[in-house]
Image (cartoon, rainbow, N blue to C red):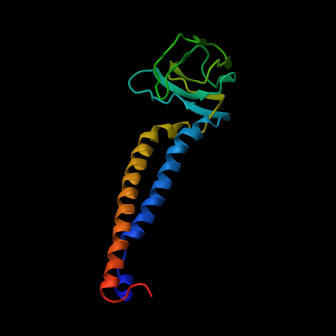
Amino acid sequence: MEEEERLVPLNPVRWKYLSAMFLVLSLAFLSSTFILPTLKVPQTVTYNGPVVPYYTGDTSLSGYYIPPVAAGSKVVISFYNFIPGSIDIAIFPTQLGDLSPSGPTIYAGNLLLNASYKFTSTTSQPYGMYVGSHNNTLYILKITATFSPYFWVTTYSSLGVIASFASGVLFYYYNFTARRWRLEQQAIREATGQGTN
């Protein structure tokens, strides 16, 4: 009988342990989607613009998203290497993962020289920026701010919830099945005279 049990590739007890491992990993993943975005460190990102190519005209409108920055920290936005007077910018607060204004514009204007614009974020807030470039001009945009390099993992929170729920159901099911399987195996051993010694 013991030889027959060894031939079973995955009995309910093994499925129980696998589902428990899946549950632990799912909960760890779900927790990371909430914890990692709160770890904010100084970041600098550089773009070669415009991100929207010139197609049929000499004007392009590009959008840039600044993840939620730490409250009380400075945001520095710098433009370099462009034709003077050919760049219009608008900086505004926005919602998480969105690029449409959700409050009054922080700054809007035309850039005549290589310039940096600085402001302090009073709350933990994402920001958006529209850059209109004319006369087929190119530019270099540098954004320096204190935000989490893992801000994007929040988009996977729903996946973590689904995985945690599914693994919890599997663990409950196989925990119940494993107990019943053990009782059945014990009853079979007792019926065949292989009970407890």
Counting every numbered tag in the picture gives 0
136 up-or-down from 48: above or below: above
Q: Find residue 12 and report its horizontal and vertical position in percent.
A: 36, 69
Side (left or right) of 43 relative to 178? right
Examine the rendering and report whether any part of residue 140 can be seen. no
Q: Quadrant of the C terminus?
A: bottom left
Q: Nearer the viewer, residue 108 or 68?
A: 68
Q: Which residue is drawn at 32% across and 78% down?
A: 187
Q: In which quarter of the image is the N terminus?
A: bottom left
Q: Residue at x 34, y 84 (%)?
A: 190
Q: Find residue 169 and report its horizontal and vertical position in percent.
A: 37, 53
Q: Residue at x 32, y 75 (%)?
A: 184
Q: Find residue 125 and report its horizontal and vertical position in percent.
A: 58, 23
Q: In which quarter of the image is residue 112?
A: top right
Q: Find residue 134 and report its horizontal and vertical position in percent.
A: 50, 18
42 up-or-down from 127: above or below: below
Q: Quadrant of residue 22?
A: bottom left
Examine the rendering and report whether any part of residue 99 can be seen. yes
Q: Residue at x 36, y 77 (%)?
A: 9
Q: Nearer the viewer, residue 189 or 167?
A: 189
43 up-or-down from 170: above or below: above
